[in-house]
């Protein structure tokens, strides 16, 4: 399944990403200390514990520990590990090295023939002439062009969690090509992502993806490095786990969440700032440059599903919860209780309108989408605040929404009913402009591109990434086609 999708702005990615250096012994020890592989080891041995004696159990633990370390380095599938040894054995038997000295006298090991011919350059050597071409083709495949669109998918498949970096090539004739450039193995089931350009490693800008998962830690990975085994920064997380009998004790890093991270939002104005929402009922504001939590807010009484920064007032943060409320707070004055809106069901997603500083939209578990105007807000939480509009958008939970960055009032919604719909919100009187079954299963994440704003990336339960060119729909083109010329502006 694909849990989350993020676009990378064009021209940001390195044309040829660097390859990570092999981890040192100290780094391997740190990976193992984090307990990233504990869950897989425990699940593999749990079913067999009753049938194992003490010695066998110790041996199994040591083997699992060693395989976990090896897997962090080469990511080789378990099914191939045993077969590799057999391949080596078969190869040695084929060489028949034991009878090497018994070669037939008629066979000359160092013959005179075409193999001994000297060639002044590789270009005319029949054995090497294609090597340079192969290298150039491989380099071309690995090169990310400035005009390429880059999409990052957070995926879980066969109990393996990873980030996939996709390249989307759009040609003039309308034919598109899409492929995975590289991927990054991550230790926990991903739930949300947020791209950020904070220069964590120096320079003017970076190219990073923040990942929230079933673990309480927020990992920030460098998208310009391939084969990386460790994140560049980890916000919060577990320091130590202890198990005494059936009891477990967990010690967390200072300021950490203590449950799954369900939502993330990077602040584009204050580029070192990221907000997080968690199942521990808390909202936190982090400084990714220092790796520290600056602010913790506990204004919700149930899991917090989503957070979003206002585009016009970047210190204003919105959060939505399973407690059926949306709360607006000022990050600069966390002591203020903020403003609260009540909704009819669990909050699934929320977004500020990029064309209107006063408006935001919330999608809910009951299939409805509701819009609000903050100018009607009051700090008196007892007063009921009526929404600007409410639509029964889908038959099941609306997990994800995305505003079009160029076309005003154009909102996309995605649902577990497997449908994606486009809405015109003009005059607070929503109407459905287009709908599509992208065949991705239950839709968990959608996102409009900012470089080509009518491209909508879609991911869901089937684990297949789809990109919908919304302008290919006649109704969308008639209503919003005039904004398509802004793509190249």
Image (spheres, rainbow, N blue to C red):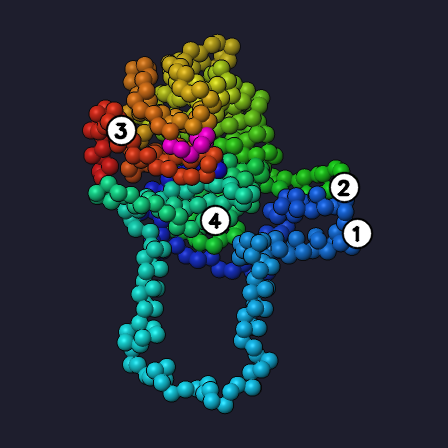
**Residue of label 2:** 244
Mark 1 vs mark 2, CA separation in Å? 17 Å
The answer to which of marks 3 and 4 sits earlier in the sequence is 4
Mark 4 vs mark 1, foreground winner is: 1
Mark 3 vs mark 4, CA separation in Å? 35 Å
Residue 109, percent from left and from top: 46, 85
Relative to 55, is 174 on the left or the right? left
The answer to which of marks 1 and 2 sits earlier in the sequence is 1
The answer to which of marks 3 and 1 sits earlier in the sequence is 1
Mark 2 vs mark 4, CA separation in Å? 34 Å
User: Which secondary structure, mark 2?
Assistant: strand
The answer to which of marks 2 and 3 sits earlier in the sequence is 2
Residue at the (21%, 43%) spot, across then down: 172
User: Which secondary structure, mark 4?
Assistant: strand
Residue at the (50%, 18%) spot, across then down: 345
Q: Does the magenta stretch include residue 164?
A: no
Residue 473 marker: 3
197 or 365: which is nearer to us? 365
Residue at the (23%, 33%) spot, across then down: 484
On screen, 388 above or below 254? above
Question: Label 4 crowding class (10 Å Cα cut-off): few <14, some 14-19, many 20+?
Answer: many
Residue 266, percent from left and from top: 43, 36
Whether residue 270 appears in this view of the structure is: no
Mark 2 vs mark 3, CA separation in Å? 61 Å
The answer to which of marks 4 and 1 sits earlier in the sequence is 1
């Amino acid at each position: 399944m694909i849990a989350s999708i993020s676009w990378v702005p064009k021209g940001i990615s390195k044309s040829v990403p660097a390859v990570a250096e092999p981890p040192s012994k100290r780094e391997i020890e740190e990976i193992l200390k984090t307990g990233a592989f504990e869950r897989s080891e425990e699940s593999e041995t749990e079913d067999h514990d009753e049938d194992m004696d003490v010695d066998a159990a110790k041996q199994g633990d040591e083997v699992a520990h060693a395989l976990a370390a090896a897997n962090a380095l080469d990511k080789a599938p378990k099914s191939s590990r045993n077969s590799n040894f057999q391949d080596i054995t078969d190869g040695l038997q084929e060489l028949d090295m034991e009878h090497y000295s018994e070669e037939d006298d008629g066979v000359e090991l160092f013959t005179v023939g075409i193999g001994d011919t000297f060639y002044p350059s590789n270009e005319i050597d029949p054995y090497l002439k294609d090597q340079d071409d192969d290298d150039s083709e491989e380099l071309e495949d690995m090169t990310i062009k400035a005009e390429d669109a880059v999409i990052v998918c957070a995926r879980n498949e066969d109990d393996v969690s990873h980030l996939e970096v996709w390249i989307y090539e759009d040609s003039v004739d309308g034919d598109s090509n899409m492929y995975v450039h590289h991927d990054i193995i991550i230790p926990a089931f991903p739930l949300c992502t947020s791209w950020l350009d904070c220069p964590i490693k120096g320079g003017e800008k970076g190219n990073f993806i923040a990942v929230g998962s079933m673990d309480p830690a927020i990992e920030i990975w460098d998208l310009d490095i391939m084969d990386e085994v460790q994140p560049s920064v980890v916000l919060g997380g577990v320091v130590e786990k202890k198990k005494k009998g059936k009891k477990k004790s967990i010690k967390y890093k200072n300021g950490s969440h203590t449950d799954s991270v369900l939502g993330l939002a990077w602040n584009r104005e204050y580029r070192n700032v990221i907000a997080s929402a968690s199942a521990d009922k808390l909202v936190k504001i982090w400084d990714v440059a220092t790796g520290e939590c600056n602010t913790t807010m506990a204004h919700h009484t149930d899991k917090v599903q989503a957070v979003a920064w206002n585009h016009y007032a970047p210190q204003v943060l919105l959060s939505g919860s399973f407690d059926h409320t949306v709360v607006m707070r000022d990050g600069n004055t966390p002591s203020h209780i903020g403003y609260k809106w009540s909704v009819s069901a669990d909050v699934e997603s929320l977004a500020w309108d990029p064309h209107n500083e006063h408006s935001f939209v919330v999608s809910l578990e009951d299939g409805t989408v509701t819009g609000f105007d903050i100018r009607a807000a009051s700090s008196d939480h007892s007063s009921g605040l009526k929404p600007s509009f409410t639509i029964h958008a889908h038959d099941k939970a609306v997990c994800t929404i995305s505003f079009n960055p160029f076309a005003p009032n154009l909102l996309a919604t995605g649902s577990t009913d497997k449908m994606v719909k486009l809405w015109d919100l003009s005059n607070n009187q929503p109407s459905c402009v287009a709908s599509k079954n992208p065949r991705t299963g239950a839709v968990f994440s959608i996102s409009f591109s900012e470089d080509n704003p009518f491209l909508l990336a879609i991911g869901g339960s089937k684990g297949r990434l789809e990109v919908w060119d919304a302008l290919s729909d006649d109704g969308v083109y008639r209503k919003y086609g005039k904004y398509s010329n802004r793509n190249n502006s």
